[in-house]
Amino acid sequence: MQARIAFTVLCAVLAGCAQQPQNAQEFRQAVPGAFMGKVQTFEAKRPLAAVAKTFQARAPECLNVSVRTVSQSSTSYQNILTVYKATVVNNPQKAELHLQRDFKSGVLVPGKVPPGGLYYVVADATPIDKSRTRIDIYGPSVGTDTLVRAINGWATGENLGCPDMTKS
């Protein structure tokens, strides 16, 4: 929960300094230099076509969800509805998984929000050779551990389960 709040604050701070990324490419360019931004890279011992097929099957099923978070203390109350939207783009040279999140209530996001919501995580899969694929995951350094583990599991074929999006 604290990671979610930290990331929400991060989004607001970044929006105050610059325009929100309006597409996946702008997001990729912004993450490496952003406060609390992180690029994680690993290798999957599977061909790109297999990774792409798994992304295509698992991302919409697992990531197109709505999550309501309610928290209360003696001085505050939050009721946040977040709608996640996964998009997978495949071609023979690359597979991309884009995850956006749209705060439907409880969060004010300054600046222009792209259609589908703010970009939250972008994962790119590119071939190393016929049997290995490189995965680059762009996103915040805090609060995405379960999501990154799921993407890693899908890419490697070792775990095809869905992440608990209430922890993202």
Image: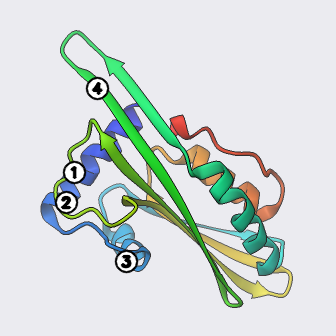
Tally the marks: 4
Residues marked 3 and 1 touching at CB (< 8 Å)? no
Q: What element carries label 3?
A: helix
- Quadrant of the image occupied by residue 58: bottom right
Residues marked 2 and 1 touching at CB (< 8 Å)? yes
Q: In this view, does 93 lie to the left or right of 145?
A: right
Q: Residue at x 72, y 71 (%)?
A: 43
Front: mark 3 or 1: 1
Mark 2: few/some/many CA within 10 Å (<14, 14-19, 20+): some
| Disc 3 target residue | 29
| Disc 2 target residue | 15
Question: Given the image, on which type of amino acid does mark 1 rest?
Answer: Val
Q: Does 77 appear above or below 163?
A: above
| Disc 1 target residue | 109
Residue 163: percent from left, percent from top: 64, 43
Q: What element carries label 2?
A: helix
**Which label's residue is closer to the chain start, 3 or 2?**
2
Question: Rounded to the nearest whole Å, what is the CA distance between mark 2 and mark 1?
Answer: 8 Å
**Which label's residue is closer to the chain start, 3 or 1?**
3
Question: Given the image, on which type of amino acid does mark 2 rest?
Answer: Ala
Front: mark 3 or 2: 2
Residue 5: percent from left, percent from top: 33, 37
Task: Determine which of the numbered discs, if any, sits on residue 78 in the image.
Answer: 4
